[in-house]
Amino acid sequence: MGNQVMPREQLGICAEGNLHSVYLMFNAIDGVEEQLRPSIANVAQYIYELTDQYADSAFNGFVGIGANFWDTFYPQARPALLKPFPAMNEGNRDAPAMEYDIFVHIRCDRYDILHLVANEINQMFEDLVELVDEERGFRFMDSRDLTGFVDGTENPKGRHRQQVALVGNEDPEFTSGSYVHVQKYKHNLSKWHRLPLKKQEDIYGRTKVDDIEYESEDKPLTSHTKRVNLKDDQGKSLEILRQSMPYGSVKEQGLVFISVCSTPEHFEKMLRSMVHGDAHGNHDHLMLFTKALTGSSFFVPSLDFLTQFDD
Ligand code: HEM
């Protein structure tokens, strides 16, 4: 390997988990692309600099561009595999699409800093965008989903996170970028809590309190981990990096599921396996207790790609 300089990735893609998050979904006002390109570059640069400034609180984040907005925004080149969210439905398992033009994802271990930065970013966009959705995520107990199970245990670790999450040299203009899918899941917790412990554990294929994986042969074919643990033709595991966090209030709560990956195909195959199941119709029973309200597809380019357009 030579000393090739890699474009700088946006640091929120591979960052380790945090205590708090803010998700801002924007749509662009028609015809403002010329002014918006430098604004987006400035916001991404600002997030990058704050990562150093607030390193003690593990600040990080990224800015993504919606699949349907990409061509309007950067007409000269498109990430090779970028496509809209793969909406799907079977029975009462629904994975609807809800696309947004811009996704700002910021996380930190201090809520006050996040609140301040979210407001600042909103101002940096001036009147060029409309804020159409906002959600705030939080760490629940020891990184558990609100169903009470630890979420993220089997995520890639260390430098393997970069290998899984970032585009390599296969698409040179977009090296160090990432394909991102977001789904806001609303849980039916009263239904879930009526389920005996063993049945809950069977749905994940893991134990609840101590988070131990079942032996493969003990996992029901309808368990979540069985449905999403997929291999390619060569027997290699299909991986994604999950950056999900619980969100919500007493009235509505669940998981903001976020997949970041060097390809959109792994997420799509996993979702298909959850919703449509295997050849025998074994679908993911977790979906009996949670409902996807949104589904969005973004590309998060490298910082260097975005800052080509900063004036
Ligand atoms: C594993 C929760 C949706 C992909 C897990 C685990 C939990 C969990 C608790 C086990 C611990 C771990 O390894 O992290 C949830 C919840 C979801 C959700 C509450 C939605 C409400 C999804 C979706 C996908 C996905 C939509 C992909 C399309 C995965 C993968 C694993 C996993 C790849 C690791 C499986 C393994 O290697 O054992 N999830 N998940 N999850 N989930 Fe999900």
Image (cartoon, rainbow, N blue to C red):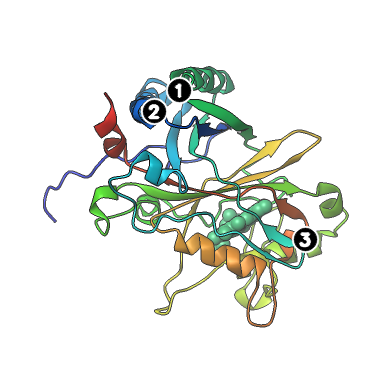
Residue 234 percent across, percent down from the top left: 39, 79
8 left or right of 284 in image? left
Residue located 51% across and 21% down the image: 122
Residue located 59% across and 63% down the image: 271
Q: Residue furthest right?
A: 194
207 left or right of 295 in image? right
**Mark 1 or 2 closer to N-term?**
2
Residue 115 percent across, percent down from the top left: 56, 20
Residue located 33% across and 53% down the image: 167
Residue 205 visible in the snapshot: no
- What amino acid is at disc 1? Phe
Return the mark for residue 288: 3
The quadrant of the rendering that contains the N terminus is: bottom left
Return the mark for residue 36: 2
Residue annotated with mark 1? 125
Say which of 19 and 288 sits in front: 288
Residue located 82% across and 54% down the image: 192
Q: Quadrant of residue 142?
A: top right
